[in-house]
Image: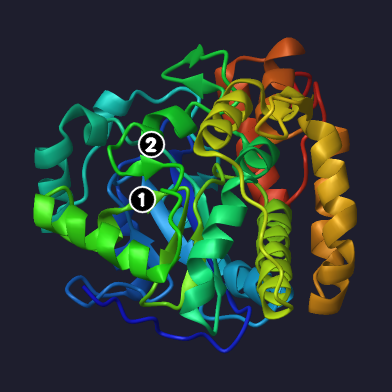
Amino acid sequence: MAIWWNPSRGATLGVEWELQLIDSASKLLRQDAREVISALRGRDEAGPQPKIHDELMQSTVEVVTGVCSTVSEAVADLAATIADLQRITDMRGTMLACAGTHPVSDWRDAKMAPAQRYAELVEQMQWLARRIQTFGVHVHVGLRDGSKAIPIVNALAAYLPHFLALTASSPFWGGHDTGLASSRAVIFGGLPTAGPPQLLADWSEFEEYMDTLLRAGTIRSIKEVWWDVRPHPDFGTVEIRMFDGVPTLREVGMVAALSQSLVHLFDTQLDRGYRLPSQPSWVIRDNRWRATRYGLDAIVITDAAGSTAPLRDELYELFLEIQPVAQRLGCADELDVLGEVLERGASYERQRAVVATGGGLTDVVDALVTEFAEDRFVRPGEVANAE
């Protein structure tokens, strides 16, 4: 089966940000995405708002950018759409936030969006799909040449723990601390075609593998392959899906800068005839688990011989390596937020700090709402001591 690649005009960007709809009184998730979207577009039967979509669960609205050339353009695009969205949610007594999971709401209270494709997904996946009341950030980076997609996906797979640890934001699930930095990585990763990408040799092997999955009835479309990093032929992009939901626009800018810089670096290295680095699949899976459990405090495997290093050190080295690339792409300021996360803590750490300083899980929700609304990191004790 031939899969056509729709070439991008370079390292373009597209960002998808899944937001939580939260009731301002109960602090629980509100299951009314369709009503919010209908109010936003001002008529009930029209097609969806181009940059705001519903998702599987009605607790979610997804804000998407157009095709952007720079990180700053993507951030401005998101900010403009969110300003429109907030005018509707404010009138409805609804607050917006983002984290990989809601700290308190029970997944069994979720309502599914009334769409045929979602009903079919739940029928096929059953409990695995019904519990996906989770939220993430997806970043698309464009490629001109589709033959580079598989080598770049393979290289990016080594950075799954980096992507996850920086954005891990789902320590709580159904009112309990899971002991994980990212429960979302486990919940969504439980789908049979989710998780780390299959390491393939080239584009022809990707085409053959997709054809096999279709022939076997494992998938009905290649869009049902929800790898943590995957090629997106229709868009002409490599899509990084490993990020947990992040609470602030600043952190969205950070992951967009990280994604664009890494893909551009690998694209350039292929042009120069270099062979991109890759890791064995067992190392990729083990490191993904370590970041899921320990976040930034993970000790990750660095080679096939089993050598290890602190993930924080690896992130700092990565930061130094891609700074020159980010400067050339004009996203050095956005990439600098990575240093702030290492210093101030990823979202899972900031959430747990609210509880450690005397707050409850509804205070964690308040902190997430504040971080989203004010685009800043809440300080430990700030919410708990506000009263």
Q: Residue placed at 69% from the left, 24% from the top? A: 306
**Disc 1 crowd, CA 10 A, few/some/many (<14, 14-19, 20+):** some
Of the residues shown, which amino acid type is indicated by label 1?
Trp
Q: Residue placed at 63% from the left, 37% from the top? A: 161
Q: In front here: 363 or 273? A: 273
Compared with residue 372, is residue 275 higher up or lower down, i.e. above or below?
below
On the image, numbered disc 1 is attached to which residue?
A: 226
On the image, numbered disc 2 is attached to which residue?
A: 188
Q: Position of residue 104 (x, y in %)?
A: 46, 22
What sort of colour scheme is used for the picture?
Answer: rainbow
Q: Position of residue 280 (x, y in %)?
A: 56, 39
Q: In front here: 163 or 369? A: 163
Left or right of residue 71: residue 179: left
Contact (CB < 8 A) between labels 1 and 2? yes
In the picture, which quadrant includes the N terminus? bottom left
Of the residues shown, which amino acid type is indicated by label 2?
Phe
Compared with residue 340, is residue 83 higher up or lower down, i.e. above or below?
below
Which element carries disc 1, helix, strand or loop?
strand
Q: In front here: 216 or 186? A: 216
Res 80 → quadrant:
bottom right
